[in-house]
Image (cartoon, rainbow, N blue to C red):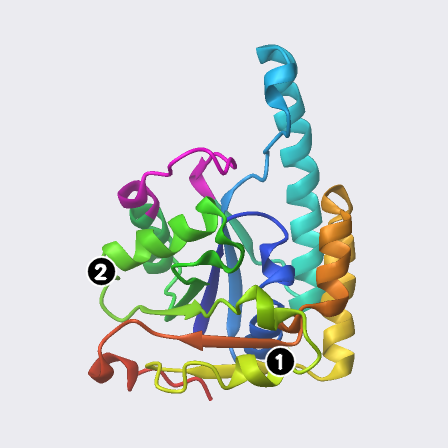
């Protein structure tokens, strides 16, 4: 089975999908498709156009290197891909969903992907780019033989409480194709180490998430496809 994770930015693979990546790397051929270069520049309006472009290139290069190192630590593989025509990392931009879906599905067909895993409609943090990944694959039917799973967003009022992982794992019991990925404490530490590789994004908020978010240890995946299709997904 070939599984491809579709993420919006470098660092999504560990901060959000870490448990799923760890689970599938043990039972399937896993790869990663990143839809942007992670080139977002805060307070860009204060920079001239030339300085802004230069800063974008610097950040994108750094984040690409961080992503490849993080993925290598999580999976022991060098299977990171970027879109041929990547979207621009910016929460204020509206990504072209049809264009994005076409690239994602072309990648899936070319690389013989069986299962695509990406965000759900809330995108974990509500980020517009995360939600665009969901909207792209949800609005456009996948190619024959390609299945799509979504990462269930854990509400913030549950995500950071001590028993949050247990509550999250039992959420949406009636969801189609529901599958829970849980990590051991050793595996959770590996995901934290992968997070620390993204030094360029090391903020207090991310530090808190590394040590308190239940999504660092538990992921709930589900399908929006019909029941007949879901039964064809063998995750074991």
Q: Which numbered disc, 1 or 2, marks the residue that appears first in the sequence? A: 2
Residue depth check, mark 1 versus mark 2: number of the one nearer the observer: 1
Query: Vertical placement of 26 versus 204: above or below?
Result: below
**Residue 18 quadrant:** bottom right
Residue on which disc 1 sits: 165
Q: Residues within 10 Å of mark 1 (few under 14, many from 20)?
A: many
| Kind of element beneath mark 2 | loop
Q: State the residue at coordinates (47%, 57%).
A: 123
Look at the image and give the residue range highlighted in magenta: 83-100
**Count of numbered labels shown in the rendering:** 2
Marks 1 and 2 sit apart, C-alpha to C-alpha, by 32 Å
Residue 121 coordinates in the image, percent (x, y): 38, 59
Residue 153 appears left or right of 79: left
Which numbered disc covers residue 232? none
| Kind of element beneath mark 1 | helix
Residue 168 in magenta? no
Which numbered disc covers residue 141? 2
Q: Residues within 10 Å of mark 2 (few under 14, many from 20)?
A: some
Residue 160 coordinates in the image, percent (x, y): 67, 69
Q: Quadrant of the N terminus?
A: bottom left
Residue 93 coordinates in the image, percent (x, y): 43, 33
- Seen from the viewer's position, the closer of residues 3 and 112 is 3
């Amino acid at each position: 089975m070939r599984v491809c994770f579709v993420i919006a930015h470098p660092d999504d693979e560990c901060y959000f999908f870490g448990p799923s990546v760890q689970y599938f790397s043990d039972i399937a051929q896993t790869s990663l498709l990143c839809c942007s270069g992670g080139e977002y520049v805060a307070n860009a309006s204060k920079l001239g156009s030339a300085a802004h472009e230069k800063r974008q290139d610097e950040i994108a290069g750094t984040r690409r290197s961080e992503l490849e190192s993080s993925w290598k630590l999580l999976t022991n593989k060098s299977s990171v891909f970027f879109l041929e025509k990547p979207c621009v990392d910016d929460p204020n931009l509206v990504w072209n969903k049809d264009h994005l879906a076409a690239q994602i599905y072309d990648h899936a067909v070319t690389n013989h992907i069986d299962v695509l895993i990406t965000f759900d409609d809330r995108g974990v943090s509500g980020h517009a780019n995360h939600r665009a990944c969901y909207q792209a694959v949800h609005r456009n039917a996948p190619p024959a033989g390609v299945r799509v799973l979504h990462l269930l967003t854990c509400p913030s009022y549950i995500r950071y409480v001590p028993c949050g992982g247990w509550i999250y794992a039992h959420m949406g019991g009636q969801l189609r194709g529901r599958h829970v990925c849980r990590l051991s404490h050793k595996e959770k530490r590996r995901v934290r180490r992968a997070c620390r590789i993204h030094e360029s994004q090391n903020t207090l908020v991310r530090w808190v998430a590394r040590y308190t978010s239940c999504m660092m240890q538990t992921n709930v995946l589900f399908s929006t496809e019909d029941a007949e299709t879901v039964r064809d997904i063998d995750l074991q």
